[in-house]
Image (cartoon, helix red, strand yellow):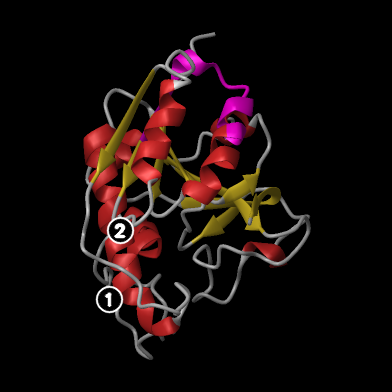
């Protein structure tokens, strides 16, 4: 069987502590390596992330169909002693993350049929995750990211019903659920959607759309959505439905 080509993309920043597990999980994948490509973008790191990535790729030259690693600094650094989840940092942080994703996409995408976005700090997912996601043949699909099996949803950027319904409330149902917005911890996207213009907006996108939240939690008003959430709204505007799998769990550290 001639399986479709898949491009795995991962933006990284100060990620040396996560790289060993990240590559261990990739090495476990059961999808044929000659049908997989890998692209990574390092941005604004203050450690040796880029060198550590290149070292690990050099050890796996024959593992995948092709690989690429790029660097693009945006001059964005978190203030000292402030966590990246601090509310006042979310808009600038996610603006840069959206730009990182888009830059990586434009550099790495070639002839693949699918793009699989995987965050560097995931700690576990099934070895056959690629096959399982592709089997649904949905244009945009994500598994359920949690911090412990059966626990609450970690990736709260995946939602429906005005941002009130996450996948932990939809377990045990029909399997597939419709999403208005998506997260990026692991996200499968049909490559032609990206080629047709689907990006991660580095700005608030979708003002006037019926699927944005009526009150954005950071702005206190309807303003559209940004980054992965903005991608979900843009996909809907392009005629593509986003889907989630509440019972297919992946673990975040």
- The residue carrying mark 1 is 208
Residue drawn at 44 percent across, 79 percent down: 82
Q: Position of residue 227 (x, y in %)?
A: 34, 62
Q: Assess whether mark 2 and mark 1 are in contact (beta carbons under 8 angstroms).
A: no
Q: Is residue 11 magenta?
A: no
Q: Position of residue 248 (x, y in %)?
A: 69, 46
Q: Which mark is residue 133?
A: none
Q: Which mark is residue 98?
A: 2
SS category of the residue bearing label 1 = loop
Q: CA distance from mark 1 to mark 2?
A: 21 Å
Q: Is residue 136 left or right of residue 212?
A: right
Query: Which quadrant of the rendered structure holds the C terminus?
Result: bottom right
Q: Position of residue 238 (x, y in %)?
A: 29, 51
Q: Earlier in the sequence, mark 1 or mark 2?
A: 2
Residue drawn at 35 percent across, 77 percent down: 79
Query: Which quadrant of the rendered structure holds the N terminus?
Result: top right
- Give the residues in magenta: 24-39
Q: Position of residue 115 (x, y in %)?
A: 40, 36
The residue carrying pointer 2 sits among few (fewer than 14), some (14 to 19) or many (20 or more) residues within 10 Å by Cα, namely many
Along the viewing direction, whichever of 40 and 202 lies nearer the viewer: 40
């Amino acid at each position: 069987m001639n399986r479709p080509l898949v491009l795995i993309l991962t933006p990284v920043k100060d990620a040396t502590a996560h790289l060993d597990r990240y590559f261990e999980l990739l090495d476990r994948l059961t999808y044929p390596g000659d049908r997989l490509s890998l692209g990574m973008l390092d941005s604004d790191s203050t450690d040796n992330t880029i060198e550590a990535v290149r070292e690990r790729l050099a050890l796996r030259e024959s593992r995948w169909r092709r690989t690429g690693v790029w660097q693009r600094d945006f001059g964005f650094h978190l203030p000292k002693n402030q966590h990246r989840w601090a509310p006042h940092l979310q808009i600038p942080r996610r603006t840069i993350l959206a730009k990182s994703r888009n830059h990586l996409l434009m550099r790495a995408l070639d002839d693949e049929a699918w793009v699989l976005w995987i965050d560097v700090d995931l700690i576990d997912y099934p070895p056959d995750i690629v096959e399982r996601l592709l089997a649904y043949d949905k244009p945009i699909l994500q598994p359920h990211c949690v911090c412990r099996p059966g626990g609450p949803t970690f990736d709260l950027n995946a939602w429906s019903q005005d941002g009130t319904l996450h996948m932990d409330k939809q377990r045990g149902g029909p399997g597939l659920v419709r999403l208005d917005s998506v997260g990026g911890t692991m996200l499968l996207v049909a490559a032609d959607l990206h080629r047709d213009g689907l990006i991660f907006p580095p700005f608030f996108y979708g003002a006037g759309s019926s699927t944005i939240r009526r009150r954005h939690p950071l702005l206190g008003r309807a303003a559209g959505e940004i980054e992965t959430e903005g991608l979900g709204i843009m996909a809907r505007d392009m005629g593509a439905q986003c889907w989630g799998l509440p019972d297919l769990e992946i673990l975040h550290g």
